[in-house]
Amino acid sequence: MELFASNETVSTLEQALSDRTDVASIAMQLELAWYLRQRDGQRALRMCEVIEQLLATYQLNAGEQKKIQARLQLIRAENDWLTTNFDNARQQIDIALQLFSDIADHPGLADTHWLAAQIEADAGEIQLQQQELALCMVQAELAQDKIRYEIANACIARQNVLRMHHPDEEQWVRHFESLTIYQNQGLLTWVFDFLGVQAGQYSDFATATTQLIRATEAAANSGQITRAIVISANICYSLAGLRDTEGSLKWGQHALKLARQKDWPISLGISLTQTADAFRKIDQLDSAKELLNEALQTLHNVTESRSYVIALRSLSDIALAQLEFHNAYNYFKRLESHPVARLQQDFQCIALRGQAQALLHLNQIDAALEAAQTALTIANANNYPDYQIASLWALADIFSAHPELRSTKLNQGVSSLQFLLQAVEIGEKIQDYAISDKLYARIAAEYATLADFSNAYAYSLLAFSSREKSLNIDVKNSAIALQLRLQTEKAISESEHHKAIVEEQQRRATILEQANETLCVLGTIGQEITTQLQIDNIYQVISHHVNALLDVTHFSIFLLDSTGSTLTLTYGMEAGKRLPQHQFSVDDQIYYSSRCIRERREILVDNFETINAAAQLPDTLKMESLLFSPLIVANRIIGVMTMQSRRKRAYGEREQLIFRTLCSYSAIALDNAHAYSQLMDARNQLVDQEKMAALGSLVAGVAHEMNTPIGNSLLIASTISERTKTLSSLIENQNLKRTELLDYLDNVKEGSKLILNGLTTAATMLSSFKQVAVDRNTEHKRQFNLRTTCQDIAASIRNRITNSGHELQLLIPDDIEMKSYPGPLGQVVTNMIENALLHAFADRSHGHMIIAAERYGTDQIRLQFSDDGNGISEKNIGHIFEPFFSTRFGQGGSGLGLSISYNIITSILHGQLNVKSKVGEGTCFTMLLPIEAPDMKD
């Protein structure tokens, strides 16, 4: 990842990314966010949030995680720096330094120190800036990254030449001129910027302008928008030095336009200050003053910054030029005491020289003299030629205005002429330094005052020569300015072109973000739609979202019948009203829905005027835009969905994409609902079959149980009938003996007793069966005794238990009364018994089952069914309540018994069912049931 990237690189990344959000895209998204940090800071921050979400979704190794997190910190730190939130920016920098250090990421560390340097520069901490730039170079060297190294090097060189003439200047110029062959736009920005600033320090405004225009082109192309703003403002100042007022104003306006668009305080403050200085050079002092006041207001939150100091210095000079000496003195005094100015001797020279000039006009001569002398001392100590000359001129003004100062012991023999001659001497020592014609003219005037007309004439000639040279320079500069005008137009055009590229990137990014947001919303909607299994609910959800996302007056869903020949309007809404059901053939040539099915494609109609009115459904409104889409699942068409609007051309690409996506989700949901409905019908049919099988078993058991008492009663009744016939015959033949009569009466008496007992047993059994059968089929809630109900259930199945060689024991207290659903409860108990007979006691006899119950708390009972059978394996125990799970399919097992029991207990009886089992020892089902069950809802 580079420190800066070209617009072409950014466009390539944009195209490669598109709407990808997979793990492989994280690195590309991070790189793009890094390159967008000044191009489109807000988007870069949003991308940081997306990347963090992806990191939470996908697990990367620790090193990659730290590398990404550190870069995210830098992006946020840069945003904080640009908005002058320096404290937050420094905190982010510290975190990034730690993370990059942990993984020894030298390019990352270089970038972190680079950003830290920019923060400290704008915060006015120049020494810290230099330290951070030096550290940046160290890390770049460790990374063997020449580009990063030279960018930091150029920045250091630029800062140094701003502080007057540096001994390494010539070496730097040669070095950076050799780097102009590089194509890296990020590096060229700083190389050309250095060369332009260095030329400007020697008033070579033509060279300065040329280099700075190249710098601003490179800055715009490499996403260094802050540099583009500052350099554009410097071009404005440089063209003012060439006296190209029109070009200067054009670049000033360009800088201000860029700065106001971004609204970064430091950048805007710098552009306002530099443009104001250009206005000051062309004597537009009021306009300059207005811009400087705006600059100070813009920078009010960063008064400790160097930018604020520069604006304050310029405002001080303007106040002096406008003869506002009190204001000028106060401004220069504030400048002198400013923390940044106190650390930089050039600002001290400016502040003291300005105070001296203001105090002179305020007639505070001693203070003025002291300030001017201090300024000269500082300038001499630091070898600042320009400030030496300015300080000497100020001293000359003081001694010229107050010649009495020469009579003091301290200043004896000192004259204004001496100061002016010293200024010329300093200027002559500087190669290519143009001494002002005003300085020569001033010396000539001083000599004339002293009646030294020879020297006065000589310096007059020098003044004339200097003026002529200055005029020649002005002419030359005007010619150069004309040459630069074309370059300026081209540069601004290039800048506008880069801006257009950035805007296009932003537009595309916005479209992509909107598309991503739309896809995310559609994904959420899709989940909501496809989780519905009731067809009416699906219709409601689809209709709601279609109307929420799109311009819809009419919305309909048509489904194909099972033969695929007829379409039925199963759901339709128009203007808030439900449409009646309507049917037509797929072969119908009028309706678009039929055509959509036949052609298996979307149909968009933008203007209804060309459509046959018969194509409308009966009693519906006239529409201007219609969109039909087939509902397709796994290459099967199940129907058609349509949305329609009364607005022309209502459905563009975005609307079609949304509708197409909703149709896909709807097709899946409707197909799932149909499959679910079929499954539920099959399930209900199987449950009914299971119930009927259980009832058949119950009837068979009861019939078998009743067979013995009724059969015995019939046998006894038959015997009594035969004895009665015999008795009647004896009576007719008058052969009846007393003993025979008494024997007959005893037999009848005993037989009647046996018949009565047998029939009573049968009647009781029949009554229990009727109650169980009614409970099983009605599912009515009623009051019942738990023991009695369980006895009735046991009685109905006892014959099968006995014949199987097993036994069932009831351990239920007599006093447990429940208000619940005895039928469903009986079905559960029967299923438990049947399950034990089939599975627990398979291939064995003498099995023992127990139904036990006890109160559990105040409002529940604990009912347990246990057996000492085969038990259930660990592999199977987690599946026994699943529908259609059975280990004995084809041997009497349906896989529904325990599933039905679980559903009855949890949904009808509102209880809980748990199971414990151990292979070879048996199984125990525990039910916790409320004594009074809630009413069932319809």
Image (spheres, rainbow, N blue to C red):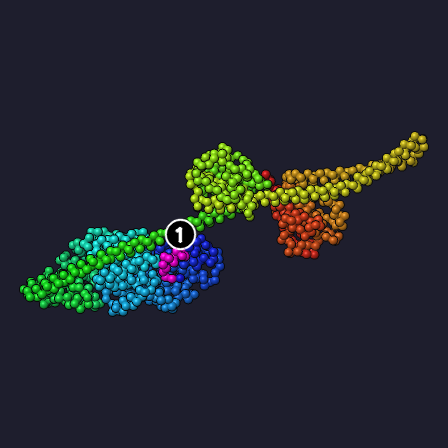
Residue drawn at point x = 61 percent, y = 45 percent = 679
Q: Which residues are magenta?
A: 2-14
Q: Element under label 1?
A: helix
Residue drawn at point x = 29 percent, y = 60 percent = 214
Mark 1 Cα-neighbour bin, 10 Å: few <14, some 14–19, many ≥20:
some
Give residue 521's position: percent from left, percent from top.
46, 47
Q: Is residue 573 left or right of residue 391?
A: right
Rendered view: 183 above or below 826: below
Instruction: Examine the image and state in which quarter residue 251 appears.
Output: bottom left
Q: Mark 1 is on which residue type?
A: Ala
Rendered view: 175 above or below 299: below
Main secondary structure of the magenta stretch: helix
Question: What residue sits right under mark 1 in the picture?
Answer: 509
Total marks in image: 1
Rendered view: 426 above or below 271: below
Q: Nearer the viewer, residue 98 or 616?
A: 616
- Indicate whether residue 55 is drawn in magenta: no
Whether residue 81 appears in this view of the structure is no
Give residue 484's position: percent from left, percent from top.
24, 57
- Indicate whether residue 10 is drawn in magenta: yes
Q: Is residue 580 left or right of residue 807?
A: left
Give residue 32's position: percent from left, percent from top.
40, 57
Q: Nearer the viewer, residue 229 or 42?
A: 229
Give the quarter of the figure containing the N terminus: bottom left
Residue drawn at point x = 37 percent, y = 66 percent = 145
Whether residue 60 appears in this view of the structure is yes
Give residue 239's position: percent from left, percent from top.
23, 57
Instruction: Examine the image and state in which quarter residue 79 appears.
Output: bottom left
Q: Nearer the viewer, residue 435 or 592?
A: 592
